Image (cartoon, rainbow, N blue to C red):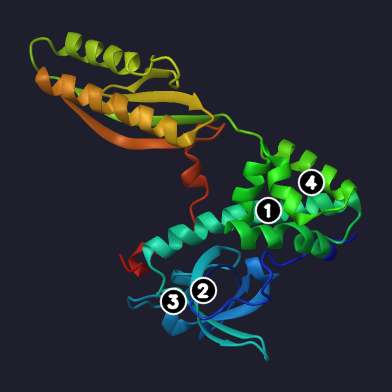
Amino acid sequence: MTSKDFQVRYYENEMPAIGDVVMVKVEKMTDTSCYVRLLEYNNIEGMIPYTELSRRRIRSISQLAKVGRLQIAVVIRLDAEKKYIDLSKKQVTAEERRQCEERFRKSKTVASIMCYTAIETKIPVLDVMKAIAWPLYKSHGNAYDALKQAVQNPDQIFGPLKLDAALHEKIVSIVQIKLKAEVLKLQADVNVTCFTAEGVDAIRDVLLLGQAAGQREGSPIVTVNVQAPPTYAIHTTTEDKEAGVAMLQECIEVMKAEMARRGGQVEVREPPRVMGADGKAEEEKDKLDSDEEDADE
């Protein structure tokens, strides 16, 4: 199999519909337009006219789009027969951008798993998509959510697909390896200050109180470390992101209440977020080349 064998659209429909918000990659810039590839639709070409890049006046297109960068755009005109797709970046709202980014990450993971399954089984990837991914999109909204459930309940998810025995066994094995629970490191940064007579003692007590709030049985363990006074980092590790974020937020609220009682202040500098192995927030590394002023917030 060559690399072209693994170029496949993520969804059953060959093209998006008018109004669909899609992830695109900038391929070429001209004086009047930005030409892009729709990553979820087998890299078919689309065009963002100059007038649809931004709501504000700009001196050049290069201010808002760079070749090779990802953008989120909405389909505004479509000719399915001629395969013409016109898109708009400026008409995408902040909420649509967030939803598209989340959907794309999930769908990209699904496509990757299907490609790996195709390699392992020597079945064309399009046939694997037809047999597994596309039916799961229909039954579960997003195939990624179904595959996550299949880690614990494979027969419940894959049984209705009536796969042949070899393909069923392989996709179960691959999903359990690729989508097993990941241990996440979460961190929140706070500034802790107290200028009363008991300032040092108050700060120490509040930090210990915040750490103790995360020591309940069944909850993620919380630790507090100094970064550079008055900034402190509150950490936890967990397989459940929502539970971890909720735990850190609870610790922060406990610290705020106690410090307010003692005449000081706890200010959130950075809210709870997932940290990478390099110590940087994953959200920062995955940030798209987007113009927030273009969002209809």
Q: Nearer the viewer, mark 4 or mark 1?
A: 4
| Residue at 91 percent of width and 54 percent of height | 122
Q: Nearer the viewer, residue 294 or 114?
A: 114
Placement of the N terminus among the 4 image quadrants = bottom right
Mark carried by residue 171? 4
CA–CA distance in space, label 4 to label 2: 30 Å
| Residue at 48 percent of width and 52 percent of height | 287
Label 2 residue SS: loop
Residue occupied by mark 2 = 20
CA–CA distance in space, label 3 to label 4: 41 Å
Residue occupied by mark 1 = 110
Residue 143, position as x, y percentages in the image = 64, 55
Q: Amino acid at mark 4?
A: Ile
Instruction: Using residue 38 as the reference point, say whether residue 171 is left or right of it.
Output: right
Image label count? 4
Placement of the C terminus among the 4 image quadrants = bottom left
Q: Is residue 182 above or below residue 58?
A: above
Instruction: Using residue 169 as the reference point, say whether residue 296 is left or right of it.
Output: left
CA–CA distance in space, label 4 to label 1: 11 Å
Q: Amino acid at mark 1?
A: Val
Q: Amino acid at mark 2?
A: Asp
Residue occupied by mark 3 = 53
